[in-house]
């Protein structure tokens, strides 16, 4: 078990969800407040990171997974020569595993009196994002907006296929899974699958995380040039 998970951003989110659920009063208002809380927290699970004691907004800049088209568009919006860094018009922060699936899994576990750590593991495993263009987003089939090709919920079959024997899926396996079961585009689209790029594949090995400063723009232009 990660000894620092409780202090992590997702660990703190898991604790707040757990405590909010268990401190509810038995009425519709409490249920409404809980739904508002969990919806917002699951959104922010992938848009903010805790770096030392700082909270960093990484809705776009600092994200690990981008579509090839989104990288190209970002570079057009943020030329290498210039001060631009965070212009992200017509880009979409897309939750790879739909938040509704994560929410339903968490609520099911809460009803079974699960632990905070189990909630953390759900969030840590499935709260991942991909930056795509708004055009790509519009071409994702309606069914795949709230689920996957073969799964409508996070159950044992989904977990086995998504995670295998690991606690979380990353890199090429994550990309292959998403491209096969979630990011197939509508048949009318010329490019049938959204091509996802892992920014970590283009970074030096000693780097701990995708940069969220001016180095990010340089990395994006490097990747765009290599494509």
Image: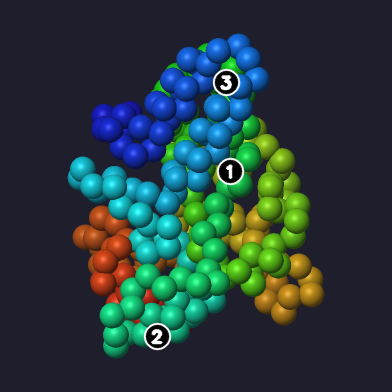
Say which of 221 and 36 sits in front: 36
- Residue sitting at x 51%, y 33%: 37
198 in relation to 164, above or below:
below
Across and down, in percent, residue 120 comes to 43, 31
- Looking at the rendered image, the disc whose residue lies closer to the viewer, 3 or 2, is 3
Q: How many marks?
A: 3
Whether pointer 1 and pointer 2 mark residues with C-beta atoms closer than 8 Å, the reply is no
Q: Residue furthest right?
A: 188
Q: Residue furthest bottom?
A: 81
Residue 144 seen from this side: yes
Please say if 174 is above or below 1. below
Q: Earlier in the sequence, mark 3 or mark 2?
A: 3
| Label 2 sits on residue | 225
Q: Mark 3 or mark 1: which comes first in sequence?
A: 3
Q: Is residue 195 visible?
A: no
Q: CA distance from mark 3 to mark 1?
A: 21 Å
Position in image of residue 195 (x %, y %): 57, 70
SS for callout 3: helix
**The N terminus: image quadrant:** top left
In this rendering, is residue 192 above or below 48?
below
- In the picture of the structure, the residue carrying the numbered disc 1 is 99
Residue at 49%, 15% (x, y): give it: 22
* Residue labelled with disc 3: 30
CA separation in Å, label 3 and label 2:
52 Å
Look at discs 3 and 1 and give the one toward the viewer: 3
Q: Position of residue 117 (x, y in %)?
A: 41, 25
């Amino acid at each position: 078990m990660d000894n620092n998970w409780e202090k992590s951003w997702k660990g703190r989110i898991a604790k707040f969800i757990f405590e909010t659920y268990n401190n509810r009063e038995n009425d519709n208002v409490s249920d409404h407040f809980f739904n508002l809380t969990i919806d917002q927290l699951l959104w922010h699970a992938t848009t903010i990171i805790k770096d030392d004691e700082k909270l960093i907004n990484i809705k776009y800049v600092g994200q690990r997974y981008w579509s090839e088209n989104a990288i190209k568009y970002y570079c057009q919006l943020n030329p290498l020569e210039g001060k631009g860094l965070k212009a992200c018009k017509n880009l979409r922060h897309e939750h790879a595993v739909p938040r509704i699936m994560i929410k339903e899994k968490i609520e099911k576990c809460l009803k079974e009196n699960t632990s905070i750590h189990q909630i953390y593991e759900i969030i840590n495993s499935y709260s991942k994002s991909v930056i795509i263009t708004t055009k790509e987003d519009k071409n994702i089939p309606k069914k795949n907006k709230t689920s996957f090709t073969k799964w409508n919920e996070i159950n044992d079959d989904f977990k086995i296929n998504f995670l295998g024997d690991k606690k979380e899926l990353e890199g090429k396996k994550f990309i292959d899974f998403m491209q096969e079961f979630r990011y197939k585009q509508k048949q009318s689209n010329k490019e049938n699958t959204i091509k996802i790029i892992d920014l970590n594949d283009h970074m030096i090995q000693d780097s701990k995380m995708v940069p969220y400063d001016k180095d990010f723009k340089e990395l994006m232009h490097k990747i765009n040039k290599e494509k």
